[in-house]
Image: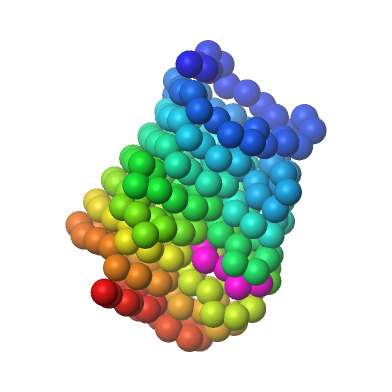
Amino acid sequence: VITLDADLDMSTKEAWVPVTEFKGILDGNGKTISGLTIEATGNDAGLFITNNGIIKNLTLKDVTVKQVSGAAGAFAAINTGTIQNCVIDGGALTVNGTDAKLGAITGHNQTGASMIKDCKVKGNVVLTVAGGKVNAGGLAGVNGWWSKAQIQGSSIDKEVSFVYRGNGEGAIGGLGGWNVQGTITGCYSLMTITAFTAVNAGGLVGDLYCGDIFGNIINANVTATLGAGGVSGRMFSL
């Protein structure tokens, strides 16, 4: 178990090079890491590339994730564990790549064991898709992968914004970009989504491919040029 006992200011430090895989417990203990800049390892970027453990009770303030071409999220590029009671408070995350995945919390909430719970994105957070075909969401770029990955009790505040300038038919949503049999419950999104190129965009998810979405509140402002909807830009079911 790693427990923080003080706030950390990383604004004058060199860019963070992500740990490839985390399998333990990181307890932020209500503390804040501020001014963190995260560089990509290979094509992916996050505090960790893969979180296979538990990250909890941690705030990242004014975090920057530099432009990457794979999966990007402030806490983990790919989450196969639990991220709980964590906060993004201000920052900028950018991706540009074919089949890239972008979320403020994680790029891909991937497996049946993956959980995002009681997390919050607030303050002046700007998520940008600078190019490429990208699945991007306020919390997770992709939720599930033929699995019951879960997002519960989490929120996106109205100061948060999404700018999409991708190429091809991607998906962006207030909570998740592409939901592939995942479950999203008890969440809300108030963010503003602006798409300057063709994309499926929804207040909750951009593309719903099966899965369960219920008990959520939508008040997102969505402007898109392909498919736009209050809940989902496009829906499929089996």
Residue 152 percent location from the top left of the image: 30, 46
Residue 190 percent location from the top left of the image: 38, 60
Query: How many marks are shown on the rendered structure?
Result: 0
Residue 207's place in the image compared with 212, above or below, is below
Q: Is residue 128 visible?
A: no
Q: Is residue 206 left or right of residue 213?
A: right
Residue 197 percent location from the top left of the image: 59, 82
Instruction: Residue at 53% x, 74% y: name it.
Output: 170
Residue 197's place in the image compared with 128, above or below, is below
**Residue 106 in magenta stretch:** no
Q: Is residue 104 left or right of residue 204?
A: right
The colour scheme used here is rainbow
- In the image, the segment drawn in magenta is 132-136
Residue 81 percent location from the top left of the image: 42, 37
**Residue occupying the far top of the picture:** 5
**Residue occupying the far bottom of the picture:** 226
Q: Is residue 136 visible?
A: yes
Q: Is residue 83 left or right of residue 230?
A: right
Instruction: Residue at 36% x, 41% y: name it.
Output: 113
- Between 1 and 146, the residue placed more toward the observer is 146
Instruction: Residue at 39% x, 43% y: name it.
Output: 114
Instruction: Residue at 68% x, 65% y: name it.
Output: 96
Task: Quarter of the image for the C terminus: give it.
Answer: bottom left
- Between 66 and 149, the residue placed more toward the observer is 149
- Between 136 and 150, the residue placed more toward the observer is 150
Where on the picture, by quarter, is residue 36? top right
Prevalent SS, magenta region: strand
